[in-house]
Amino acid sequence: MSTEIKKRGPGRPKKKKLPRGRPKGEATIMKDYRLRMLNSPKSPYVLEKIFEAALDDNHKHQAAAWKLVVDRIAPISSFEKDGKKDGAKVEINITGLSAPKVSTDSAIDGEFEEIEGA
């Protein structure tokens, strides 16, 4: 029978040092990405290609180029209800449209049905 006393460890393990402050989030990453794109020597070339595609009627990505350009010129947030503090709104009214007419001239087997809500 051995009467050895088991020695305990040096105590509680030391905590790992974590970096201080808030970790980089999506907003910071996007800001860095935007700065990198603007500082790139190729950015004028990319913009020129987007404008060429937007102006070319036969280009297969013309609609996408339009969307890129319009999103930068007039962002959707400026058209939203609470988008601006001054209360500016964009309102689209379509006039001249009348209620649809229902024709019962082509009834099957001579039966006529009245359609409600039209």
Image (spheres, grey):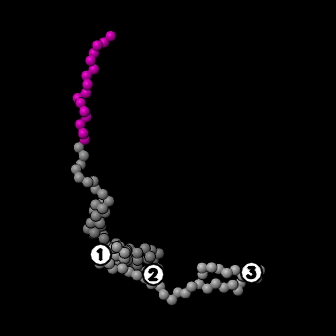
Left or right, residue 65 beside residue 13: right
Residue under circle 1? 85
Q: Which of 113 and 9 is in front in this view?
A: 113
* Image position, residue 94 (x, y; %): 47, 85
**Magenta span main SS:** loop
Residue under circle 3? 111
* Residue 102 visible to an observer of this rendering: yes
Q: Is mark 2 on a helix, strand or loop?
A: loop
Q: Label 3 sits on what residue type?
A: Glu
Say which of marks 2 and 1 sits in front.
1
* Image position, residue 47 (x, y; %): 34, 74
Query: Marks 1/3: CA distance?
Result: 59 Å
Left or right, residue 20 beside residue 116: left
Say which of marks 2 and 3 sits in front.
3
Q: Is residue 4 magenta?
A: yes
Residue under circle 2? 57
Classify 10 Å Cα crowding around label 1: few (below 14), some (14-19), many (20 and above).
Answer: few
Q: Does the magenta stretch include residue 90?
A: no
Query: Marks 2/1: CA distance?
Result: 38 Å
Question: Which image quarter: residue 49?
Answer: bottom left
Question: Which image quarter: residue 46?
Answer: bottom left
> Residue visible at 61% across and 85% down?
101
**Range shown magenta:** 1-16
Query: Marks 2/3: CA distance?
Result: 51 Å
> Residue visible at 33% across and 73% down?
83
> Residue visible at 27% across and 15% down?
4
Q: Where, quadrant-wise, is the C terminus in this rendering?
A: bottom right
